[in-house]
Amino acid sequence: MVLPAAPALAEDQSELLALTPTQKQALAGVKSWKITVAEGYGGAEEYNGVPIAEDCRRILEYAGWQVVPAGATSFDAVLAIDVGGRPHGAYYGQPYAGSGEFSYSGATVTIDASVQAHGKPLVSFSTSSYTVPCPSTIFSHTSKPENAPFSRAYYDCRDFFTQLFSVVHAARGAEPIERAMNDSDSDIRGHAFSFVGLVGDRNFTPFLVGLLSGEQGEQGWSFTTSKARPAMLGAAQALGDLQDARGVEPLCTVLLAAEDMDLRLAAAVALRQIGDPRALEALSQAVLVGDESDDVLQETAKALGELGGAAATASLERALAMHLEPDVAAAVAEALGRLDWQPQTDKQKITYHLARDDKDAVVQMGRKAVPVLLENLKLPRWEPRELSASLLGDIGDPEAVDPLCAAVLGDDDHDVRTAAAQALGKLRDRRAAGPLGQTLLTDDHAVVRIAAAEALGEISGPEAIASLQRALPATAGDPATSGAVADALGKLHWQPETSDQRVLYHLVRDEGEEIVRMGAEAVPHLVEGLEHQSWERRQLSASLLGKIGDPAAVDPLCAAVLGDDDYDVRVAAAGALGWIRSSAALQPLCSALNDDNSNIRWAAAVALARIGDRQAAVALKARLENETDRKVRKALLDAVEALGVSAEDLSYEDRLLLLARNKDWKGLNAFLAEQTVERLIAALKVDNRLVRNTAAYLLIDRTGQTDLGTDHDAWSEWWKAQGQTTSNGIEEE
C-alpha cells in the first residue's frame, strides 16, 4: 500500500527525553555498548532479578549496535542501570497454616539509568512503578519477600522504555522502533507502540498501516491469526494516538472485518481519536448492523456523536429505535444529545428518555406514553420490557391491566414478570387477582411469587383474599413466599377460620406464641408438620410441640429424634421430649446418646436430665465413659447429678469433675489426698482448673517438688527419673 507523505502533527504534548544536537552527534559515533545492571530488592535475597539487561540488549541491537559481554573492556558507550525493588507486605484474614507471616502481594520497582558515550556522561533518566495486589495474589500465601510481584511492577515501568526508545530514535530513526514493534516479546512490543503514540512521529504511519493490512510482520498474518493480533492491536492504538487520517481506511476495515473483539474496539477508539468524516459509513454500519460487543457499539456511538453532521445524526436516530442493550442505548442517546437532537414523536421521546434513564420524564407524559410502553412489552430484549412494565404501573392507566396480566403469566424472563406483578399491585385493579393468584401457585421463581402476593395485598377485595387463601397451604414449603402470602392476608385484615388455618397462618408469620396458646387444638397440625418437606417447618413444629407439652406428641417426636434426616430437627425433637417429661421417651433418648452428631447427644442428655427418670442412669454412665466432647460431657454429668447417681459409681475423672463442678473443694481435696502419686499425676490431665490445681498442690506437699506446677508431662518425667513407673489412672479406669 502506497501512502502520501506525512502531514504535520499538532504540537507534541508528551514529556519525552529530548536530546540536543551535541548529544545526537555523540551517539552517531557509537558502535558498541556495554550494559551494567545493579539490583537490590529490599530483603528478597533469593529473587533472581528482572530481565532488564536482556530487554535492553534486544532494543539496542535493533538499532544495529553491538552489545558486548559484561566482562568486556572495549566499548563506545555504557548503559548503566540501577534497579531497586521493595516488597509490600499485606495481611489478609487469618494466615495459612497458623503462621503469622506476611503475604507479599505488592511491590515497587525503581529504575535509574544513565548513558555515557566515549567516556563522557550523555543523559540520565529514572522511573518507578508500584503494583497493587490483584485477586490472584490476595488469596495466595506468599510468605517470602522474593515472591512479591516484582516482574509485574517492572513491566509497568513504561517510562524507562519510552526514554530508552527516545535515545534509539534520536540516533537511528524509525527503523529500530519498527523492528521492536515486531518483537516476539509482548512487553517490548507494547513499549514500542506506546513510544510511537507518545513521540507523535507520523512517519511511522506507513509501517503501522502495513501491520493492520498484513503487509508487515510475519507472512500469513491476518485478522484471524492469533500471532497477528498483538501487533495489530498495538498498531491500531498507535494510529489513534498519532491521529493520522491515513489510518482511517485500514482502521475501518478492522472495525468491520476483524473477528477479534479487542481489535474492533481498538479500531473504534482510534477512529474516534482521529475524527475523520471518512469513517462515518463504517461507524454507521457497525452500530446499525450490530456488533457482538457492547463496548464496540458504545465506542462507535461516541465516535458518531463527535463526528456530527446530518448523516451521523440519522444513523444514531435509527440506532436509538433499535432498543439496544441499556449501556449502548445510553451511549447513543448521549451522542444524540451532543448533537442537540430533539425527539419528535411520542415513540422517539419515550425511547430517548428510557435510554437516558429519565423515567420521570416518561411518567410525566401520562397516557400518551401508554401505547408505546405496551408495544415495548413485546420487544425481544428483556430490559425494555421490564422497564416498560414498571412505568405502566407508575402511570396507572387501567388500559395496561390486561397486557400486564399477560406478561406476569407468560413472559419468559422472571425480571419482567416481577415488574409486571409489581405494576399490577400499583394499579389495584381487581381483574388482576386471578392471574396473580395463578402466578402464586405456578411460577418457578420465588421473587415473582412474592411480588404477586404483595400485589394481591395492594388490590384487596374478595377475589384477592380468595387467591391468597388458596396459596397459603400451597406455598407452605416455601418460607419466603408463604410469609409474603401471610403478610398480605394480614394487611387485608383476614382472620383464619379453622384451626388448621390458624396454625399455618401463625407458623408462616413466626407467631409461635399464638400457636402455643391454642394448646391441644394445635397438636395434630404440628404433628403433621413433623412430616413436612421443609426442615425449618419440621424443626419449628417439634419445638412448639415441646412448649405445648401434650403427651400425644411423644411418639411422633420419638420417631423424629431417631429418624429425621436433619440434625437440627432431631435436636429440636429431643429438646421437646425433655419439656414434655414423659418416661415413654427414655429409650429413644438413650439411643440418641450414641448419635454421631454431638449436638444431638447433648440435647438427649439435657432431655434425660429434665425427665429425671433413674432408668436412664446406666445409659448416661456408659456414654460418659466414651464421650470426648466437652460440652456433651458437661450435659452428661448434669444429667447424672440430676438423677442422683452416687459419685462412687463414676469413673475417676468423672468423679473429680463432679466434685469440682459442685465447688466441693474440701471433698475434692479429701478424695485426692487418698490417691497415689501416679493417680495425682493422672489428675493433672483433667480438663478442670480446680482439679489440676488441687492435684498439683498435693503433689508438691507430698514430694517437695515446687517447680513443676500443673505440667502433667513434667511431673511424669520427674517421677520416671525417681525410678518409678507412671500410669494414666484415668485411662485405666
Image: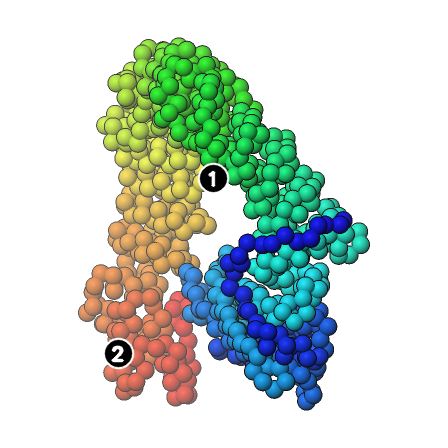
Q: Position of residue 718 (x, y in %)?
A: 38, 85
Residue at the farthest right position: 219
**Please, what secondary structure does the residue beneath circle 1 have?**
loop
- Amino acid at circle 1: Asp
Mark 2 or mark 1: which is in front?
1
According to the picture, the residue beneath numbered tag 2 turns out to be 698
Query: Is residue 156 positioned above or below 672 on the image?
Result: above
Answer with the quarter of the image where residue 713 lies: bottom left
Q: Residue at x 54, y 22 (%)?
A: 379
Query: Is residue 393 positioned above or below 61 on the image?
Result: above
Q: Residue at x 64, y 67 (%)?
A: 169
According to the picture, the residue beneath numbered tag 1 turns out to be 565
Q: In terms of depth relative to the viewer, which is nearer, 120 or 655?
A: 120
Q: In terms of depth relative to the viewer, which is nearer, 313 or 538?
A: 313
Whether residue 432 can be seen here: no
Q: Position of residue 329 (x, y in %)?
A: 51, 32
Q: Quadrant where the C terminus lies?
A: bottom left
Query: Is residue 476 positioned above or below 590 on the image?
Result: above
Whether residue 424 can be seen here: yes
Instruction: Point out the tag, 2 or 1, that comes first from the N-terminus.
Output: 1
Q: How many marks?
A: 2
- Amino acid at circle 2: Leu
Q: Is residue 280 left or right of residue 367?
A: right
Q: In terms of depth relative to the viewer, which is nearer, 229 or 502?
A: 229
